[in-house]
């Protein structure tokens, strides 16, 4: 099966890690171009050593490359602000965009939850690192019972939050919260991110709180564990940190939830840990690894389905 040619915009940590993943592991994608704006970046230097065509003149430089018209998909690992400009330049030329920023121009996509529904979209948004880690859990609870409220706390090592991540903090919270609703199925979502300065750096941790209608807790437990296994298929370092916790909130002692009101039912708490694969980034940077892994899985599925006709 011939490989689908792709380009990556962004020669920072996320873009470079995605490039290494494609070169090392993908059987269906070919890295045809690596695009940056800093001629001296480590990412562009690595790409050149690995034989990948590069440009430090941004998207305009890519469009002027000899084989730009052979590229089918473009991964954007820059910033929400930059992606809006890139989308305006690339989408009219027929490129399908996979957006690793919180710009959310296209539909939110989490590979194990809703990729099939949006495979033909011209721009697919990968939500955020916290979204990729936690939305599957909310969706897993939602397969058993209606989720009224979902709140997630993503704690990442400060060292794993580069300039792009820090510039997108506000977009992270808004986009992740929206993804908990549109993809996870919660009626109301809330997202919190914590940059932990601890030394040595800590592995990414995520806590997911779901308030749902009362139901059989064993069914919820089984659904969550099944979902964790599905995510592990492309993020091996994704795992439960401890046992899933359940608490029934009785009608005579309801919780008051902003935007929801009085709540009684089942509270499910899931604790996750995400360890990176160490392809380019350190193992503690699971927040970056889960984004590049989800983007890679999305690109490969799209290549098989849309461009190469395989199921």
Image (cartoon, grey):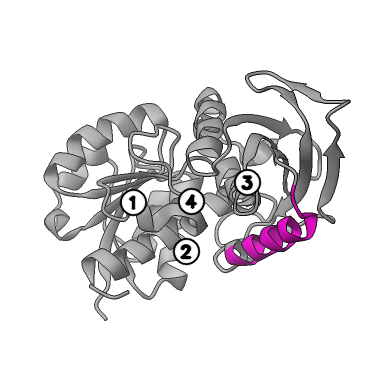
Q: Secondary structure at mark 3?
A: helix
Mark 3 sits on what residue? 138
Mark 1 sits on what residue? 118
What secondary structure is the magenta-colored segment mainly?
helix
The residues bearing labels 4 and 3 have C-alpha atoms spaced at a distance of: 12 Å
Comparing labels 2 and 4, the label whose residue is closer to the camera: 4
Q: Which residues fall within the magenta stretch? A: 215-230
Who comes first in sequence, dot 3 or dot 2? 2
Q: Is residue 273 above or below residue 31?
A: above
Mark 4 sits on what residue? 110
The residues bearing labels 1 and 2 have C-alpha atoms spaced at a distance of: 23 Å
The residues bearing labels 3 and 1 have C-alpha atoms spaced at a distance of: 19 Å
Residue 148 quadrant: top right
Q: Is residue 158 left or right of residue 34?
A: right
The residues bearing labels 3 and 2 have C-alpha atoms spaced at a distance of: 27 Å
Q: Is residue 262 above or below residue 19?
A: above
Inspect this view and state whether residue 17 appears.
Answer: no
Who comes first in sequence, dot 4 or dot 3? 4
Crowding near the residue tagged with mark 1, few <14, some 14–19, many ≥20 C-alpha atoms within 10 Å: some
Q: Are marks 4 and 3 in contact (CB under 8 Å)?
A: no
Q: Secondary structure at mark 4?
A: loop
Comparing labels 3 and 2, the label whose residue is closer to the camera: 3
Mark 2 sits on what residue? 21
- Give residue 12's position: percent from left, percent from top: 46, 43
Residue 221 quadrant: bottom right
Nearer to us in this view, 132 or 285:
132
Q: Is residue 208 left or right of residue 30?
A: right
Residue at the extreme bottom: 1
Comparing labels 4 and 3, the label whose residue is closer to the camera: 3
- Give residue 248's position: percent from left, percent from top: 84, 40
């Amino acid at each position: 099966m011939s490989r689908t040619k792709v380009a990556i915009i962004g020669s920072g940590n996320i873009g470079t890690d995605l490039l290494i993943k494609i070169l090392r592991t993908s059987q269906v994608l070919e890295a045809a171009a690596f695009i940056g704006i800093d001629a001296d970046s480590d990412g562009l230097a690595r790409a050149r050593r690995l034989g990948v065509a590069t440009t430090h003149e941004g998207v305009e430089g890519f469009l002027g490359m000899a084989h730009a018209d052979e590229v089918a998909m473009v991964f954007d690992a820059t910033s929400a602000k930059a992606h809006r400009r890139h989308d305006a330049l690339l989408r009219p030329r027929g490129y399908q965009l996979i957006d690793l920023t919180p710009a959310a121009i296209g539909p939110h996509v989490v590979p194990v939850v809703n990729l099939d529904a949006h495979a033909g979209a011209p721009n697919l948004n990968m939500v955020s690192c916290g979204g990729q880690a936690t939305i599957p859990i909310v969706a897993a609870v939602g397969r058993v019972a209606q989720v009224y409220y979902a709140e997630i706390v993503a704690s990442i090592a400060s060292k794993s939050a580069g300039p792009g991540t820090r510039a997108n903090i506000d977009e992270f919270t808004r986009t992740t919260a929206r993804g908990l609703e549109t993809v996870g199925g919660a009626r109301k979502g809330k997202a919190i991110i914590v940059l932990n300065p601890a030394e040595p750096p800590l592995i990414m941790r995520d806590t997911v709180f779901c308030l749902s209608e009362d139901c059989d807790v064993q069914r919820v437990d089984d659904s969550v564990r099944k979902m964790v296994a599905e995510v592990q298929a492309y993020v091996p370092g994704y795992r439960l940190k401890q046992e899933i916790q359940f608490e029934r909130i009785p009608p005579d002692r309801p919780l008051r939830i902003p935007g929801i009101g009085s709540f009684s039912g089942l509270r499910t708490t899931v604790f996750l840990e995400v360890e990176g694969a160490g392809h380019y980034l350190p193992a503690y940077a699971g927040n970056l690894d889960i984004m590049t892994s989800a983007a890679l899985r999305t690109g490969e599925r799209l290549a098989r389905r849309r461009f190469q006709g395989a199921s």
